[in-house]
Image (cartoon, helix red, strand yellow):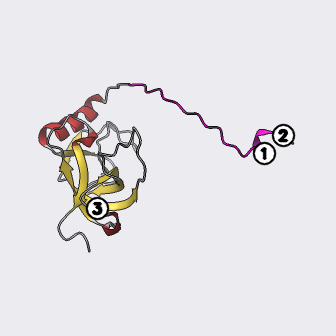
Amino acid sequence: MNDWRTKTIPLIHHSKIKVPYTWAVGETGSKFLRTLRDEKKILANKCPKTGKVFVPPKLNSPTTLEPITEFLTLDGTGKVMAFTQRHYESAAAPKDLPRIYALVLLDGATQAIPHFLGEVDFSQIHVGMRVKAVFREERTGHILDIMYFKPTEGSAS
């Protein structure tokens, strides 16, 4: 039998094409990114029906589809829910970015956000570790205006 299911060689496509693109982040996304850039603060918003707190903020609740208009400012602290480390370089992950990724549940938020961890050795990280946001000096209105999250005092326990 000679069909595709018996083949064990994967198909691989190597491309060197880079396609730049832009998109509008909308009013809610713009408010979130401007606040990161201009005030070094992390905005969230709260569903009026479920009380769930979203960061980055959502235009509508993913649960109820209700418009969300109540914004909150989070203090940038939270805890590590999961983490991993990368061992390679690529255009999407240049060597100047931290090598540790984590899901960080910010205090007051309902769901974790993916971001980098810095100023910490991988062997010292644990689920539940307390962290806080470190902002770049020069910010542009991008999620990477938060350079990374670093452990807070006494979080190594």
Based on the displayed image, in which of its 4 quarters is residue 123 positioned? bottom left
Q: Quadrant of the C terminus?
A: bottom left
Q: Residue at x 23, y 46 (%)?
A: 146
> Three-letter amino acid code at disc 1?
Thr
Mark closest to the chain's N terminus, 3 or 1:
1
Assess whether mark 2 and mark 1 are in contact (beta carbons under 8 angstroms).
yes
Give the Cα separation between the discs numbered 3 and 1.
46 Å
Label 1 SS:
helix
Q: Position of residue 75 (x, y in %)?
A: 17, 53
Disc number placed over residue 2 in the picture, else none: 2
Residue at 40%, 58% (x, y): give it.
84
Q: Relative to the observer, which residue lies in front, 12 or 82?
A: 12
Front: mark 2 or 3: 2
Element marked by disc 2: loop
In the picture, which quadrant includes the N terminus? top right
Label of residue 79 in the image: 3
Provide the residue span drawn in magenta. Answer: 1-20
Q: Which residue position holds label 1?
A: 6
Q: Which mark is residue 59?
A: none
Cα separation, mark 1 vs mark 2, equals: 7 Å
Q: Say which residue appears at 31% left-offset and 57% top-offset.
A: 105
Label 3 close to label 1 by CB (< 8 Å): no
Number of labels in the image equals 3
Give the Cα separation between the discs numbered 2 and 3: 52 Å
Q: Position of residue 117 (x, y in %)?
A: 29, 55
- The first of marks 2 and 3 along the sequence is 2
Residue 80 falls within the magenta-colored stretch: no
Nearer to us in this view, 74 or 18: 18
**Image x and y of residue 121, in percent:** 30, 64
Q: Amino acid at mark 3?
A: Lys
